[in-house]
Image: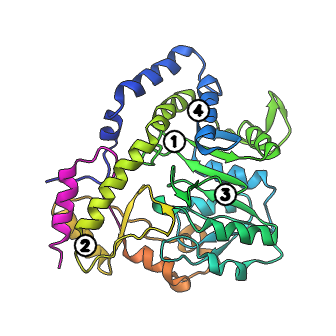
Amino acid sequence: MQVDHSVLKRTYDLHSAEYEAAALRALRSGWYILGREVEAFEQQFAAYLGMKHVIAVNSGTDALILAIRALGIGAGDEVIVPAATYIASVIGITENGATPVFVDVDDYSHIDADAIEEKITAKTKAILPVHLYGQPAQMDVITDIAKKHGLYVIEDCAQCHGSALSGKLSGTFGTVACFSFYPTKPLGALGDAGAMATNDDELAEKLRMLRNYGSKVKYHNELNGVNSRMDEIQAACLQVGLKYLDEGNKERQRLAEKYLKGITCEKITLPATRPNATHVYHLFPVLCAERDRLQKYLADNGIHTLVHYPIPPYCADCYKDWGYKMDAYPNAAKYSLQELSLPIYAGMPDEEVDYVIEVLNRFE
């Protein structure tokens, strides 16, 4: 049997007629940039989150860059960020000239909230927790620390649409939340797209200006902005995806439960869910000390897996001048060396999940 890590066509096929109708609606409107579809998606996603403002942009990375810029964070400032994350979380900081200050991660692959305060200095302006793999970081503790020290909280919600902590949705804890709608995400576009969410009226106005060349009125450029506008077709398709977001999350949770109950191989550590957290399983990450051998074994049996992320951002070639070694952050290094993501997505057949479990349990 051949099992792919993700088959976007299967997810699309679940609601293909609605996606096609939405795209045609946008095409036939004759208005393709910052029109009614973007406005409708912003309003609908804000209502879903229970937030006052959603500002749509062209990627999750741009959402991070613009959120940090709108908060006035730049050269000479520090932002605390987890040592294990996708590099986009760090690019958002460095693109603004600020300095990332890394904190190792906990047993849930999130920033270790108990280790944050020792990294706070007079230069610290914000904490940037990342809700990695589909569940929230320890936001109750993080927000308390931020309030105590007068810091912004910038949530990286690229992988956690619909996840929650004690019933409160990810993306609703901080000063501003940044979302990616990359096609594989729980809420995925049919191309690149992203958004920011906030309850701060003034910040929302700045973000709207920054995404559109720093202007409210054409040719009147008040801020140092960029061109980062979600197009109308993506906004139309995202309205369809949002309609079925909770349904898709429940399906991945069901498949994840099959993995959790079925995988018994002692060489594999299964992902744990934080107490009081709702996990939406954007990914299903397992740990194995013999990760590379396991990945090859699965590939030899027709199962495609992915590694998230083999090079932690503090060791990225583009940041080599920082001089970090892999073991600077032991838990982050462990994830980089041992993590393997099993196939999981809305539309994945049960028989493929059963086959993955069967093959994994034969690994010796």
Per the model, the C-alpha gap separating discs 2 and 1 is 32 Å
Q: For residue 103, what is the image quadrant?
A: bottom right
Q: Which residue is mark 3?
A: 173
Per the model, the C-alpha gap separating discs 2 and 3 is 38 Å
Q: Residues within 10 Å of mark 2 (few under 14, many from 20)?
A: many
Per the model, the C-alpha gap separating discs 4 and 2 is 42 Å
Residue contact at pointers 4 and 2, CB within 8 angstroms: no
Question: Callout 2, which amino acid?
Answer: Leu
Q: Which residue is mark 2?
A: 294
Q: Nearer the viewer, mark 4 or mark 3?
A: 3
Q: Earlier in the sequence, mark 2 or mark 3?
A: 3
- Is 318 magenta? The answer is no
Question: Residue 151: which numbered mark, if any?
Answer: none
Q: Earlier in the sequence, mark 2 or mark 1?
A: 1
| Figure check: 197 above or below 306 | above
Q: Position of residue 53 (x, y in %)?
A: 70, 40
Relative to the observer, which residue lies in front, 244 or 157?
A: 244
Per the model, the C-alpha gap separating discs 3 and 1 is 25 Å
Residue occupying image coordinates x 79% and y 55%: 71
